[in-house]
Amino acid sequence: MATTTYDKEITALLVIDPYNDFISEGGKIWSRIRGVAEANGCVPHMLQVLNAARNGGFRVFYAMHRRYRPGDYETWKYIAPIQKVAWQRKPFEYGTWGGEIRPELAPKPGEIVAGEHWCSSGFANTDLDLLLKKHGIHQLIVIGLLAHTCIEATVRYAAELGYEVTVVKDATADYSDKEMNAALDINIPNYANAIVTTKEVVGSIASL
Amino acid sequence: MATTTYDKEITALLVIDPYNDFISEGGKIWSRIRGVAEANGCVPHMLQVLNAARNGGFRVFYAMHRRYRPGDYETWKYIAPIQKVAWQRKPFEYGTWGGEIRPELAPKPGEIVAGEHWCSSGFANTDLDLLLKKHGIHQLIVIGLLAHTCIEATVRYAAELGYEVTVVKDATADYSDKEMNAALDINIPNYANAIVTTKEVVGSIASL
Amino acid sequence: MATTTYDKEITALLVIDPYNDFISEGGKIWSRIRGVAEANGCVPHMLQVLNAARNGGFRVFYAMHRRYRPGDYETWKYIAPIQKVAWQRKPFEYGTWGGEIRPELAPKPGEIVAGEHWCSSGFANTDLDLLLKKHGIHQLIVIGLLAHTCIEATVRYAAELGYEVTVVKDATADYSDKEMNAALDINIPNYANAIVTTKEVVGSIASL
Amino acid sequence: MATTTYDKEITALLVIDPYNDFISEGGKIWSRIRGVAEANGCVPHMLQVLNAARNGGFRVFYAMHRRYRPGDYETWKYIAPIQKVAWQRKPFEYGTWGGEIRPELAPKPGEIVAGEHWCSSGFANTDLDLLLKKHGIHQLIVIGLLAHTCIEATVRYAAELGYEVTVVKDATADYSDKEMNAALDINIPNYANAIVTTKEVVGSIASL
């Protein structure tokens, strides 16, 4: 894929669900994604991209999944399978360590954390689209978890809503290669304008 | 207006912005709306409608304005006048008494507080529409503040999104009669299916 | 109000509901708005603004109300008052002269007509927001009909969605001064960054 | 998967992109999906499900892709890969046979065709959500094309927006098994409450 260049006036980094439960030792879901995440260098790559974006003067946004709170689902008449799992397993539980952002990836002052999303897309039922528009953003560089759920959902929504997207393929992870490939090789190429490595995107940013 | 009946399977009460800053003695905006609010019996009527809804077994939702936090607006390239005012005056400041719900109107367990809205509509850039759908709600009874900004905006959005709306005209308030009339007499009749008094809506609910 | 300047890279003209039924002799609603429209110079002003925008190289978008088609409402379980009126009076009927754009205001090649809206906001349930984003637009100059319904609704939505808006106050009309004033003097000032005359906006554009 | 039952008061059939270009001999994309489509019995199954829904008194909705029109994309500053392909290949060209619904699947009076979508989700930037709400619909049975693009996108959006979804897995098709499996086996199970065969869904409907 050809080198992509980025204009920081219209491009932002979007960090998706960097919760301890996903990517820290002892997190509820970490054991299930550790194999792919470590093979992919997911966490160190996320940090590299984040640092490069900050150093390059790019705006940083966070899209965070609903932190589980008691009573979230008991009264719903209609519920999706992925929400039933959230109800049962209580990922990112509010007020617990698992529901906190992994410390070295935490937002710095001036970085923007959008409202929590209830399903998989960081845009659905949140202020993410608004906050991007308020800052004049039209292009997103996306990192985070999981490839075939929240990353793919957010990328699909981004494309539907008019954004151009770059996905950093070694700054994400999934349960197994099967889900990673479905997201990165089959579906996301239809919606993301570029799928690059950390090395490529850091190079592009640094050369600005 | 003819008596309206409500089916609690599809109807919910929506309480908009019952912050101390709006409706409690000492609140930042209270002095500006006190005249209309007291003439209208706004606060006691809000409480009556809330109690009637609870006693009648209706679901209760809250739509809350963004509580001001430092840094909210400094980086925005585009901003609406009403947001400039929010930036300047810091209503509903996060972590302060003014940004808390007036105690006797506070949500009880099982009642649902939607994500905060940045402008005037409780639906825009929030999960309010989602949470209403998850509970099978198609009709709303609306109370709260201010008539010509958040109430009218939320009613307009509700109509655009497919809901039927009842506005309780003596359970709201505004800066002066001019704004109240613009909302209640001129605009909202196009979008709300009923505009009623507290006495009427409480009677409708109690007769179920 | 201070002079506003416009950058055509991010600003577009938005023409709302320039149907014959609204603004042409013989249109279904013309007789009801004629008094205000003629006093205001609504139609010639709309044309002046449109010509200035075209000459200035600004993009032009159209937001059009649902043209009535038989069967539109018969099966709805929930309906807003303004939609009941549309059902009854059949404004902008599809396939009729009243449902056509007044000829001298018709879109030229390259101008963009968004999907039809069902209630009052040009943004609700349409591709208007998407098409504006696809063209990098963040600011809108708004003209058209009616002030307190579609204009105000579209301006409110625009503000909620992150746009900055200029309303041209003598390029709109309404049933009477009461509705015009509610829109232009009471409500829209909260959501539009500027409310100007045709002369002012044409001057701003021409001076670029 | 256990038998699912459907209540026609809240359940509708959603037919996605049944264009000649997709599923009729001679259509622009038919040759690329014919292998999977014929192996899966896609077209006859779509017809069976449609007939069962009609006979069972279920509402039928159509979600249709933007029919290509000259000038659609030339002025866009931002474009997704799947839209670049649409620009290049002109699928479902407006005014041509390929852009018509395959005749035996065409809507009957009273069935509802939502606004056209520009990317993959039938909900994005259209009135589909509104029209479903206006009819009290909370559950969808989904058939149509293509599994990993418009079907998956629409199912994901439906889940994000609060709907429960059944996907009929032999009433869809794709370029190859790889894309079909990514959609039906890996991604959609997170968002659809049931993935069934035509035989199963027709049986469920017929037994009502």
Image: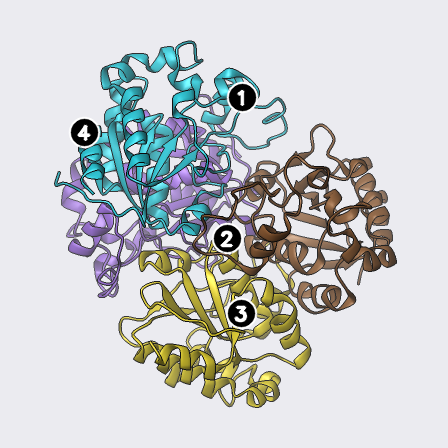
Chain colours: A cyan, B brown, C yellow, D purple
The Cα–Cα distance between marks 4 and 3, rounded to whole angstroms, is 49 Å
Near-viewer residue (B71 or C199):
B71
**Which image quadrant: the C terminus of chain B?**
top right
| Residue depicted at 70% across the width and 43% down the height | B12
Q: Give the numbered dot on residue D174.
A: none
- Please tell me how many numbered marks the rendered image carries: 4
Disc 1 to disc 2, C-alpha distance: 30 Å
Q: Position of residue D85 (x, y in %)?
A: 19, 50
| Residue underneath mark 3 | C151
Q: Looking at the rendering, which quadrant does residue A199 occupy?
A: top left
**Which residue lies under the disc numbered 1?**
A87
Residue C208 in view: yes
Rendered position, B179 above or below A143: below
- Asked if badge 1 and badge 2 are on a common chain, one would say no
Q: CA distance from mark 4 to mark 1?
A: 38 Å
Circle on res. D131: 2
Q: For label 4, count other residues whose C-alpha is less than 10 Å away and answer few (under 14), some (14-19) or many (20+).
A: few
Verify CB contact (< 8 Å) between mark 2 and mark 3: no
What amino acid is found at the position of numbered circle 2 in the picture?
Leu
* Mark identifier at residue A199: 4
Asked if the residues shown at circle 1 and circle 3 are in contact, with their CB atoms under 8 angstroms apart, the answer is no
Badge nearest the viewer, 4 or 3: 4
User: Which class describes the residues within 10 Å of circle 3: few (<14), some (14-19), or many (20+)?
Assistant: many
Q: Label 2 vs label 3: CA separation? A: 23 Å
Residue C67 left/right relative to A60: right
Element on which disc 2 rests? helix
